Image (cartoon, rainbow, N blue to C red):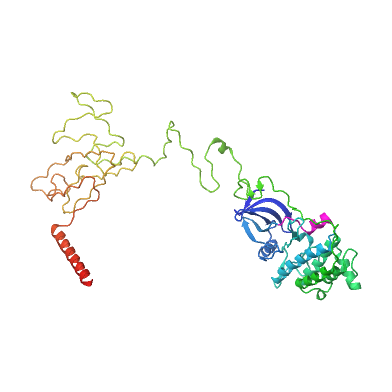
């Protein structure tokens, strides 16, 4: 109870059982109403084929209860139909016994109307009996019959699923030709309707074999004591042992029944009123007329039981294949150490001739003798270094060669050999006139000082070819104009001659357009 089938049908409670499956009251989550769901129990190929045949029937008639939709979930299949709550003919005779003849004629007329619609689709029902003829819960109003259970129905011309010496149906409702192995046909269904008529009038199951012998020996026997003669003439024609002597169609039987009703006596006012009750019973706890009152499970399989890991707070694997992340650590607890190979980027190699750079924050240089001490955390102010002196041990990196604090990007390793940018300083002007590419500016909240270039190589001897990579002799090319403050992506504009030519051409175009406008008007 409460299991959801194929993400749509919530099985509520079982209401019946058939030859190949159980019938459940189910809640259709898409159409928002209760339906009857027939769930297949057996899984052999023979039963599955019959199930497929039954769910393929689509007969739209007010007196036919045919499948409306179907669904499959793993190794289970079901099809749904309207939920009919008034029970069957078997419930009706069980409550009231023999029924009044006029009331029986109303039930038979609706049954024959539904059977005519089934035969019009070329389908032979093959299992007409009181338990398969349902009733809506109409109370004391006009009854409403629904012909159901097409589990062994067969379309004429389709191959049979049983051997020639086997017969499908319910014992006691077989036509004589079925017992002889004849192919299923419409007159066999009409013979079963005659037996159902006797069942309703008498209140008990008739003896089909004794009736057949009586017809074969005496022809049409006299009417039983509880069956009026006009009604018996119609029922006797339905019960003829020879199919050629019966009504050929259900519509023909309806016409004969309509004439017989006119000859029946009027009902007695003292007769008990027939009331068709709701045989389904109340809904289980948690369900109401408008559907379930609680959230159903997502699958027809039971969820796994909770284990000890859930009680301890450990992350549990979800049923969709994803993982539940653990909660964040409290601020007082240190974060777990990252695995090997992740986290802080490695320290880049140091070029030859430079002191090793620390990956951490540069240490505060020692205070030379003679200087007053500085407050804690404030670096001392050092005097300017004389020309040609050695580079300080710790110097901030130039933009583009490290990661801004707080971003976690790994520092770019330095190449070995002479530094083409002038000892981590400002790059020299290239030999062509294109402005040099400017490195990306660091975040505005980080102040990156530009160190003073300090050459590490001796001057080039006279007569020797200068090293183009050396910063000692900058290129004689003119310096590009200074980039405006705060600008990004700045570039040189066109020359004065080019700008004059463009302006003259634009003026000519404007003059020609104005002339064409005035002359055309």
Of residues 388 and 45, the one drawn nearer to the viewer in this rendering: 45
Residue 324 pos. (x, y %): 51, 43
Q: Is residue 361 above or below residue 435?
A: above
Say whether residue 156 is magenta.
Answer: no
Residue 4 seen in the figure: yes
Q: Which image quadrant is residue 309 in? A: top right
Of residues 109 and 416, the one drawn nearer to the viewer in this rendering: 109
Q: Is residue 324 above or below residue 512?
A: above
- Residue at the image position 85 percent from the left and 67 percent from the top: 264
In the shown orientation, is residue 52 left or right of residue 413? right
| Number of residue marks | 0
In the shown orientation, is residue 513 left or right of residue 331? left
In the shown orientation, is residue 186 left or right of residue 494? right
Q: Is residue 162 above or below residue 447?
A: below
Q: Is residue 242 above or below residue 267?
A: below
- Residue at the image position 19 percent from the left and 36 percent from the top: 391
Of residues 218 and 107, the one drawn nearer to the viewer in this rendering: 107
Of residues 236 and 24, the one drawn nearer to the viewer in this rendering: 236
Extreme residue in the left direction = 462
Say whether residue 89 is magenta.
Answer: yes
Span highlighted in magenta in the image = 84-97
Residue 185 seen in the figure: no
Q: Quadrant of the C terminus?
A: bottom left
Residue 421 pos. (x, y %): 20, 45
Residue 494 pos. (x, y %): 17, 57
Residue 163 pos. (x, y %): 75, 68
């Amino acid at each position: 109870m409460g299991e959801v089938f194929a993400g749509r049908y919530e099985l509520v409670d079982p209401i019946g059982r058939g030859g190949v499956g159980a019938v459940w009251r189910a809640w259709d989550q898409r159409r928002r109403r209760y339906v009857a769901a027939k769930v297949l129990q057996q899984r052999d190929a023979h039963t599955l084929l019959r199930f497929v045949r039954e769910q393929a029937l689509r007969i739209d008639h007010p007196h036919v209860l045919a499948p409306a939709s179907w669904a499959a979930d793993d190794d289970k299949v079901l099809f749904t139909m309207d939920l009919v709550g008034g029970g069957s003919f078997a419930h009706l005779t069980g409550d009231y016994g023999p029924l009044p003849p006029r009331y029986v004629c109303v039930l038979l007329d609706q049954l024959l109307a539904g059977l005519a619609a089934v035969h019009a689709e070329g389908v032979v029902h093959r299992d007409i009996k009181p338990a398969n003829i349902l009733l809506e819960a109409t109370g004391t109003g006009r009854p409403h019959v629904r012909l159901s259970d097409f589990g062994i129905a067969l379309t004429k011309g389709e191959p049979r699923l049983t051997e020639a010496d086997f017969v499908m149906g319910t014992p006691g409702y077989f036509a004589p030709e079925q017992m002889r192995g004849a192919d299923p046909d419409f007159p066999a269904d009409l013979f079963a309707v005659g037996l159902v008529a006797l069942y309703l009038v008498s209140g008990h199951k008739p003896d089909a074999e004794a009736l057949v012998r009586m017809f074969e020996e005496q022809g049409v026997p006299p009417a039983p004591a509880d069956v009026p003669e006009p009604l018996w003439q119609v029922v006797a024609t339905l019960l003829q042992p020879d199919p050629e002597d019966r009504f050929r169609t259900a519509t023909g039987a309806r016409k004969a029944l309509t004439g017989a009703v006119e000859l029946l006596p009027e009902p007695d006012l003292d007769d008990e009123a027939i009331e068709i009750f709701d045989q389904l019973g109340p809904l289980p706890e948690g369900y109401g007329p408008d559907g379930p009152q609680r959230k159903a499970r997502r699958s027809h399989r039971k969820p796994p039981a909770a284990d000890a890991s859930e009680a301890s707070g450990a992350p549990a694997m979800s049923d969709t294949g994803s993982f539940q992340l653990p909660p964040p650590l409290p601020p007082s607890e240190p974060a777990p150490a990252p695995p090997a190979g992740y986290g802080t980027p490695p320290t880049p190699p140091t070029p030859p001739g430079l002191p090793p750079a620390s990956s951490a924050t540069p240490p505060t240089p020692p205070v030379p003798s003679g200087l007053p001490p500085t407050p804690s955390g404030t670096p001392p102010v050092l005097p300017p270094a004389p020309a040609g002196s050695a580079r300080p041990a710790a110097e901030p990196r130039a933009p583009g060669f490290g990661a801004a604090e707080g971003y976690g990007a790994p520092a770019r390793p330095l190449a070995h050999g002479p530094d083409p940018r002038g000892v981590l300083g400002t790059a020299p002007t290239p030999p062509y006139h294109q402005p040099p590419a400017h490195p990306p500016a660091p975040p505005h909240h980080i102040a990156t000082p530009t160190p003073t270039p300090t050459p590490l190589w001796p001057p080039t001897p006279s007569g020797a070819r200068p090293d183009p990579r050396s910063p000692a002799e900058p290129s004689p090319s003119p310096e590009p104009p200074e980039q405006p403050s705060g600008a990004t992506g700045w570039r040189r504009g066109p020359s004065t001659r080019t700008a004059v030519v463009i302006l003259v051409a634009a003026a000519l175009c404007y003059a020609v357009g104005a002339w064409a406008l005035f002359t055309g008007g």
